[in-house]
Image (tube, rainbow, N blue to C red):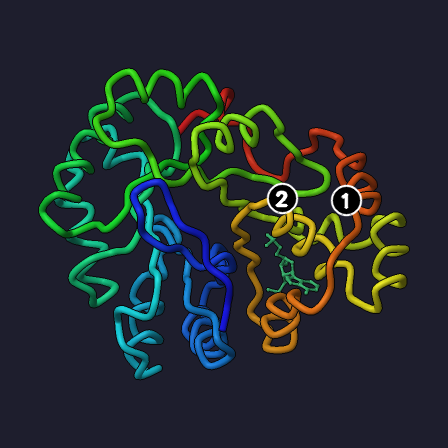
Amino acid sequence: KLDKKIMNDGKEIPTIALGVWRSGDDTKNAVLTALEAGYRHIDTASVYKNEEAVGEAIKESGIPREEIFVTTKLWNEDIQSGEVKKALEESLKKLGLDYVDLYLIHWPIEGYKEAYLEMEKLQSEGLIRSIGVSNFKVHHMKALLEVANVKPAVNQMEFSPLMQDNDILNYCNDNHIVLEAWSPLGSGSCLSIPEIQDLATKYSKSTAQIILRWLYQKGIVILPKSVHKNRILENKAIFDFTLTIDDISIMDGLNQDKRVGPDPDRYKP
Ligand code: A2P
Protein backbone atom coordinates (compact mmCIF):
# COMPACT_ATOMS: atom_id res chain seq x y z
CA LYS A 1 0.00 0.00 0.00
CA LEU A 2 1.31 3.42 -0.90
CA ASP A 3 1.84 6.13 1.64
CA LYS A 4 -0.55 9.08 2.11
CA LYS A 5 -0.51 12.57 3.63
CA ILE A 6 -3.36 14.51 5.20
CA MET A 7 -4.12 17.88 3.60
CA ASN A 8 -5.29 21.02 5.41
CA ASP A 9 -8.91 20.23 4.43
CA GLY A 10 -8.69 16.87 6.21
CA LYS A 11 -8.60 14.80 3.01
CA GLU A 12 -5.89 12.26 2.17
CA ILE A 13 -3.47 12.49 -0.76
CA PRO A 14 -1.22 9.61 -1.90
CA THR A 15 2.42 10.76 -1.80
CA ILE A 16 3.34 9.35 -5.22
CA ALA A 17 1.44 10.11 -8.41
CA LEU A 18 2.02 9.12 -11.98
CA GLY A 19 2.61 12.30 -13.99
CA VAL A 20 1.32 12.21 -17.57
CA TRP A 21 2.60 15.45 -19.10
CA ARG A 22 3.94 14.59 -22.57
CA SER A 23 2.90 10.95 -22.22
CA GLY A 24 1.00 11.34 -25.51
CA ASP A 25 -0.31 8.15 -27.09
CA ASP A 26 1.26 6.09 -24.30
CA THR A 27 -0.93 7.71 -21.63
CA LYS A 28 -3.60 5.04 -21.35
CA ASN A 29 -1.08 2.24 -21.15
CA ALA A 30 1.09 4.09 -18.61
CA VAL A 31 -1.89 4.82 -16.35
CA LEU A 32 -3.10 1.21 -16.54
CA THR A 33 0.40 -0.06 -15.76
CA ALA A 34 0.68 2.32 -12.82
CA LEU A 35 -2.72 1.39 -11.40
CA GLU A 36 -1.91 -2.31 -11.72
CA ALA A 37 1.40 -1.64 -9.93
CA GLY A 38 -0.41 -0.01 -7.00
CA TYR A 39 -0.35 3.71 -7.85
CA ARG A 40 -3.56 5.39 -6.72
CA HIS A 41 -2.86 8.99 -7.79
CA ILE A 42 -2.80 10.32 -11.37
CA ASP A 43 -1.81 13.89 -12.20
CA THR A 44 -3.14 15.30 -15.47
CA ALA A 45 -4.30 18.68 -16.83
CA SER A 46 -6.72 19.82 -19.49
CA VAL A 47 -3.82 21.26 -21.51
CA TYR A 48 -2.11 17.83 -21.65
CA LYS A 49 -4.94 16.69 -23.96
CA ASN A 50 -4.98 13.22 -22.43
CA GLU A 51 -7.81 13.32 -19.90
CA GLU A 52 -9.79 10.89 -22.07
CA ALA A 53 -6.95 8.37 -22.04
CA VAL A 54 -6.61 8.75 -18.26
CA GLY A 55 -10.34 8.17 -17.87
CA GLU A 56 -10.30 5.08 -20.10
CA ALA A 57 -7.46 3.56 -18.10
CA ILE A 58 -9.23 4.22 -14.79
CA LYS A 59 -12.37 2.60 -16.10
CA GLU A 60 -10.53 -0.39 -17.55
CA SER A 61 -8.57 -0.95 -14.35
CA GLY A 62 -11.78 -1.90 -12.56
CA ILE A 63 -10.50 -0.18 -9.42
CA PRO A 64 -13.31 1.53 -7.48
CA ARG A 65 -13.42 5.27 -8.19
CA GLU A 66 -13.07 6.25 -4.54
CA GLU A 67 -9.73 4.44 -4.29
CA ILE A 68 -8.10 6.60 -6.98
CA PHE A 69 -6.99 10.20 -6.46
CA VAL A 70 -7.32 12.19 -9.70
CA THR A 71 -5.91 15.67 -10.23
CA THR A 72 -6.55 17.92 -13.19
CA LYS A 73 -5.91 21.62 -13.80
CA LEU A 74 -7.71 24.72 -15.02
CA TRP A 75 -5.99 26.02 -18.15
CA ASN A 76 -5.05 29.65 -18.76
CA GLU A 77 -7.70 30.45 -21.38
CA ASP A 78 -10.38 29.30 -18.98
CA ILE A 79 -8.91 31.46 -16.22
CA GLN A 80 -8.98 34.44 -18.57
CA SER A 81 -12.51 33.81 -19.85
CA GLY A 82 -13.80 33.08 -16.34
CA GLU A 83 -15.59 29.96 -17.65
CA VAL A 84 -14.41 27.84 -14.77
CA LYS A 85 -17.44 25.61 -14.39
CA LYS A 86 -17.58 24.93 -18.11
CA ALA A 87 -13.90 24.00 -18.15
CA LEU A 88 -14.30 21.67 -15.17
CA GLU A 89 -17.37 20.03 -16.68
CA GLU A 90 -15.44 19.38 -19.90
CA SER A 91 -12.58 17.82 -17.93
CA LEU A 92 -15.02 15.64 -15.97
CA LYS A 93 -16.70 14.53 -19.17
CA LYS A 94 -13.39 13.57 -20.75
CA LEU A 95 -12.26 11.77 -17.59
CA GLY A 96 -15.63 10.02 -17.33
CA LEU A 97 -15.87 11.08 -13.68
CA ASP A 98 -18.42 13.01 -11.68
CA TYR A 99 -15.85 14.68 -9.42
CA VAL A 100 -12.08 15.26 -9.29
CA ASP A 101 -10.10 14.81 -6.10
CA LEU A 102 -7.98 17.88 -6.74
CA TYR A 103 -8.42 20.81 -9.13
CA LEU A 104 -5.56 23.27 -9.54
CA ILE A 105 -5.12 26.72 -11.08
CA HIS A 106 -2.45 25.76 -13.62
CA TRP A 107 -0.53 29.09 -13.71
CA PRO A 108 -0.86 32.31 -11.66
CA ILE A 109 -2.02 34.44 -14.56
CA GLU A 110 -4.29 37.49 -14.46
CA GLY A 111 -7.74 36.40 -13.31
CA TYR A 112 -6.54 33.64 -10.98
CA LYS A 113 -8.17 35.15 -7.89
CA GLU A 114 -11.61 35.23 -9.51
CA ALA A 115 -11.09 31.73 -10.90
CA TYR A 116 -10.14 30.46 -7.46
CA LEU A 117 -13.33 31.89 -5.95
CA GLU A 118 -15.29 30.03 -8.65
CA MET A 119 -13.43 26.85 -7.74
CA GLU A 120 -14.51 27.31 -4.12
CA LYS A 121 -18.14 27.26 -5.31
CA LEU A 122 -17.57 24.13 -7.39
CA GLN A 123 -16.04 22.50 -4.34
CA SER A 124 -19.16 23.23 -2.32
CA GLU A 125 -21.25 21.81 -5.18
CA GLY A 126 -19.30 18.55 -4.84
CA LEU A 127 -17.58 18.60 -8.24
CA ILE A 128 -14.13 19.02 -6.64
CA ARG A 129 -12.96 17.44 -3.39
CA SER A 130 -9.87 19.62 -2.79
CA ILE A 131 -8.71 22.83 -4.40
CA GLY A 132 -5.24 24.17 -4.94
CA VAL A 133 -2.80 26.01 -7.15
CA SER A 134 0.24 25.34 -9.29
CA ASN A 135 3.36 27.36 -10.05
CA PHE A 136 2.58 29.89 -7.31
CA LYS A 137 5.50 31.72 -5.72
CA VAL A 138 5.22 33.15 -2.21
CA HIS A 139 3.92 36.53 -3.44
CA HIS A 140 1.20 34.81 -5.49
CA MET A 141 0.19 32.76 -2.44
CA LYS A 142 -0.01 35.85 -0.26
CA ALA A 143 -2.10 37.73 -2.81
CA LEU A 144 -4.46 34.78 -3.16
CA LEU A 145 -4.88 34.31 0.59
CA GLU A 146 -6.07 37.91 0.85
CA VAL A 147 -9.24 36.96 -1.06
CA ALA A 148 -9.58 33.20 -0.56
CA ASN A 149 -12.14 31.70 1.82
CA VAL A 150 -10.63 28.23 1.47
CA LYS A 151 -6.90 27.80 1.90
CA PRO A 152 -5.33 25.97 -1.06
CA ALA A 153 -4.66 22.36 -0.05
CA VAL A 154 -1.77 22.03 -2.50
CA ASN A 155 0.76 24.03 -4.48
CA GLN A 156 2.38 22.16 -7.35
CA MET A 157 5.78 23.56 -8.36
CA GLU A 158 8.80 22.56 -10.34
CA PHE A 159 11.09 21.09 -7.67
CA SER A 160 14.13 18.87 -8.24
CA PRO A 161 17.76 18.66 -7.02
CA LEU A 162 18.70 21.39 -9.52
CA MET A 163 15.63 23.55 -8.83
CA GLN A 164 14.94 23.93 -5.10
CA ASP A 165 12.74 26.90 -4.24
CA ASN A 166 13.14 26.83 -0.47
CA ASP A 167 11.11 30.02 0.00
CA ILE A 168 7.99 28.31 -1.30
CA LEU A 169 8.82 25.02 0.45
CA ASN A 170 9.11 26.80 3.82
CA TYR A 171 6.01 28.87 3.15
CA CYS A 172 3.97 25.76 2.32
CA ASN A 173 5.29 23.90 5.38
CA ASP A 174 4.50 26.85 7.67
CA ASN A 175 0.97 27.11 6.26
CA HIS A 176 0.21 23.38 6.12
CA ILE A 177 -0.10 23.43 2.33
CA VAL A 178 1.14 20.28 0.58
CA LEU A 179 3.94 20.99 -1.89
CA GLU A 180 3.90 18.77 -4.95
CA ALA A 181 6.98 18.49 -7.14
CA TRP A 182 6.51 18.44 -10.90
CA SER A 183 9.47 17.20 -12.94
CA PRO A 184 11.10 15.84 -9.77
CA LEU A 185 13.84 14.29 -11.93
CA GLY A 186 14.41 17.59 -13.74
CA SER A 187 12.90 15.87 -16.82
CA GLY A 188 15.79 13.43 -16.61
CA SER A 189 18.51 16.10 -16.25
CA CYS A 190 19.23 15.19 -12.61
CA LEU A 191 19.80 11.49 -13.20
CA SER A 192 23.53 11.66 -13.93
CA ILE A 193 24.67 14.06 -11.20
CA PRO A 194 27.83 12.46 -9.69
CA GLU A 195 26.86 13.05 -6.02
CA ILE A 196 23.52 11.34 -6.66
CA GLN A 197 25.28 8.49 -8.44
CA ASP A 198 27.45 8.00 -5.34
CA LEU A 199 24.35 7.81 -3.16
CA ALA A 200 22.75 5.38 -5.61
CA THR A 201 25.79 3.11 -5.23
CA LYS A 202 25.71 3.46 -1.43
CA TYR A 203 22.06 2.38 -1.16
CA SER A 204 22.00 0.01 -4.18
CA LYS A 205 19.22 2.12 -5.69
CA SER A 206 18.87 4.07 -8.95
CA THR A 207 19.53 7.82 -9.08
CA ALA A 208 15.81 8.33 -9.76
CA GLN A 209 14.99 6.47 -6.55
CA ILE A 210 17.48 8.54 -4.53
CA ILE A 211 15.92 11.77 -5.80
CA LEU A 212 12.35 10.62 -5.18
CA ARG A 213 13.21 9.34 -1.69
CA TRP A 214 14.91 12.66 -0.85
CA LEU A 215 11.79 14.61 -1.86
CA TYR A 216 9.58 12.17 0.04
CA GLN A 217 11.65 12.62 3.20
CA LYS A 218 11.27 16.40 2.79
CA GLY A 219 7.48 15.89 2.92
CA ILE A 220 6.95 16.66 -0.77
CA VAL A 221 4.40 14.80 -2.92
CA ILE A 222 6.12 13.49 -6.05
CA LEU A 223 4.73 13.17 -9.58
CA PRO A 224 7.36 11.32 -11.64
CA LYS A 225 6.39 10.81 -15.27
CA SER A 226 7.26 7.68 -17.16
CA VAL A 227 5.66 5.64 -19.90
CA HIS A 228 7.88 2.59 -19.25
CA LYS A 229 6.76 -0.22 -16.96
CA ASN A 230 10.20 -0.84 -15.43
CA ARG A 231 10.54 2.83 -14.50
CA ILE A 232 6.96 3.16 -13.28
CA LEU A 233 7.73 0.25 -10.91
CA GLU A 234 11.15 1.64 -9.97
CA ASN A 235 9.75 5.07 -9.11
CA LYS A 236 7.47 3.68 -6.41
CA ALA A 237 10.03 1.34 -4.86
CA ILE A 238 11.37 3.94 -2.46
CA PHE A 239 9.97 2.73 0.86
CA ASP A 240 12.61 0.18 1.77
CA PHE A 241 15.47 2.56 2.61
CA THR A 242 16.05 5.87 4.44
CA LEU A 243 18.55 8.59 3.56
CA THR A 244 20.63 9.86 6.46
CA ILE A 245 20.59 13.50 7.50
CA ASP A 246 24.05 13.91 5.95
CA ASP A 247 22.87 12.42 2.66
CA ILE A 248 19.87 14.76 2.66
CA SER A 249 22.30 17.67 3.15
CA ILE A 250 24.28 16.51 0.12
CA MET A 251 21.08 16.55 -1.94
CA ASP A 252 20.06 19.95 -0.53
CA GLY A 253 23.46 21.29 -1.62
CA LEU A 254 22.93 20.52 -5.30
CA ASN A 255 20.55 23.39 -6.05
CA GLN A 256 21.43 25.60 -9.03
CA ASP A 257 18.04 27.32 -9.44
CA LYS A 258 18.01 25.66 -12.85
CA ARG A 259 14.51 25.22 -14.28
CA VAL A 260 13.32 22.94 -17.03
CA GLY A 261 10.04 24.92 -17.26
CA PRO A 262 9.14 28.60 -17.18
CA ASP A 263 9.75 30.88 -14.21
CA PRO A 264 6.22 31.73 -12.97
CA ASP A 265 7.17 35.42 -12.78
CA ARG A 266 8.19 35.55 -16.42
CA TYR A 267 5.54 33.21 -17.75
CA LYS A 268 3.40 34.76 -20.49
CA PRO A 269 0.44 32.69 -21.67
P1 A2P B 1 10.13 7.91 -19.97
O1 A2P B 1 8.73 8.44 -19.86
O2 A2P B 1 10.53 7.64 -21.38
O3 A2P B 1 10.36 6.73 -19.05
P2 A2P B 1 10.24 14.27 -14.77
O4 A2P B 1 9.18 13.49 -14.06
O5 A2P B 1 11.26 14.89 -13.89
O6 A2P B 1 9.69 15.25 -15.79
O7 A2P B 1 11.08 13.21 -15.61
C1 A2P B 1 10.50 12.51 -16.64
C2 A2P B 1 11.57 12.02 -17.60
O8 A2P B 1 12.44 11.10 -16.94
C3 A2P B 1 10.97 11.31 -18.74
O9 A2P B 1 11.75 11.58 -19.87
C4 A2P B 1 11.03 9.83 -18.34
O10 A2P B 1 11.17 9.05 -19.49
C5 A2P B 1 12.30 9.80 -17.50
N1 A2P B 1 12.24 8.87 -16.36
C6 A2P B 1 11.22 8.69 -15.50
N2 A2P B 1 11.52 7.80 -14.55
C7 A2P B 1 12.79 7.38 -14.81
C8 A2P B 1 13.67 6.45 -14.19
N3 A2P B 1 13.30 5.78 -13.11
N4 A2P B 1 14.90 6.29 -14.75
C9 A2P B 1 15.25 6.98 -15.84
N5 A2P B 1 14.47 7.87 -16.48
C10 A2P B 1 13.24 8.07 -15.97
Image quarter for residue 269?
top left
Q: How far across and how far down the image is residue 188, in percent?
A: 69, 53
Kindly tell me whether residue 27 is visible in this rendering. yes
Provide the secondary structure element on which disc 2 rests. loop
| Residue type marked 2 | Lys
Could you tell me which residue is drawn at 28 percent across and 26 percent down? Answer: 112
Residue to which mark 1 is pinned = 248
Q: Is residue 260 above or below residue 236?
A: above
Relative placement, left or right, of 181 versus 114 is right
Q: Which mark is residue 218?
A: 2
Towards the viewer: 9 or 267: 9
Q: How far across and how far down the image is residue 65, in percent?
A: 26, 71
* CA neighbours of label 2 inside 10 A, class few (<14), some (14 to 19), many (20+): few
Image quarter for residue 258?
top right
Towards the viewer: 255 or 26: 255
Q: Is residue 109 above or below residue 252?
A: above
Kindly tell me whether residue 74 is visible in this rendering. no
Towards the viewer: 62 or 111: 62
Image quarter for residue 235?
bottom right
Could you tell me which residue is drawn at 84 percent across and 69 percent down? Answer: 204
Relative placement, left or right, of 246 versus 208 is right
Provide the secondary structure element on which disc 1 rests. helix
Could you tell me which residue is drawn at 20 percent across and 65 percent down? Answer: 97
Relative placement, left or right, of 144 versus 157 is left
| Residue type marked 1 | Ile
